Image (tube, rainbow, N blue to C red):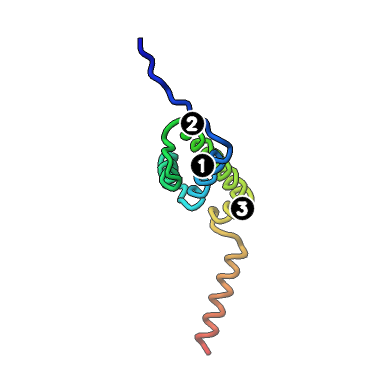
Amino acid sequence: MEEEAREVVVIDKDLKKKIKDTVNKILKRSSLYQITEVKAREEASSELDLDLSKDPYKLIVREAVERFVEKAVMTIESEVGKHHAQIVQDVEGGSEKSTKKKKKKNKTKKEDSAA
């Protein structure tokens, strides 16, 4: 039986850091609704002039994307937690303060038009 020879690629720390930094830069400037791991990998491949679709490069990109997404989710959850009370008020129809402000503004407009 013939065994297929596999090329072993050794990546130094500098190249690994450069790949991760490039992927992070791409993710930061991209819409998280539209970017995918494949798109990020293809864009990074183009920027670095390096085929990142093969192992072990592919794994480095995947780790960078997963880490970025995990941080983004934690940030979103934190922000939602901070604004939870306001969100609940908005869903329930607003707070008394916003209703009073609207009434006050309408009263001022009526006074201005009467003048």
Tell which circle, 2 or 3, labels the residue nearer the N-terminal end.
2
The residue beneath circle 2 is: 56
Q: Residue at x 62, y 47 (%)?
A: 78
CA–CA distance in space, label 2 to label 3:
41 Å
- Badge 1 crowding class, 10 Å Cα cut-off, few under 14, some 14 to 19, many 20 or more, is many
> Measured from the top left, where is residue 108 in percent x and y?
56, 80
The residue sitting at 48% across, 53% down in the picture is 29
Q: Do tag 2 and tag 3 residues touch (Cβ < 8 Å)? A: no
Q: Please, what secondary structure does the residue beneath circle 3 have? A: loop
* Residue at the left extreme of this rendering: 1
Please determine whether, in this image, residue 36 is positioned above or below residue 85.
Answer: above
Question: Which image quarter: residue 37?
Answer: top left
Q: Position of residue 7 (x, y in %)?
A: 44, 25
Q: Amino acid at mark 2?
A: Pro
Which corner quadrant of the image does residue 90 belong to?
bottom right
Residue behind mark 1: 19
Q: Nearer the viewer, residue 66 or 109?
A: 66
- Label drawn at residue 83: 3
The local secondary structure at tag 2 comes to: loop
- The quarter in which the N terminus is drawn is top left
Q: Give the residue type at disc 1.
A: Ile
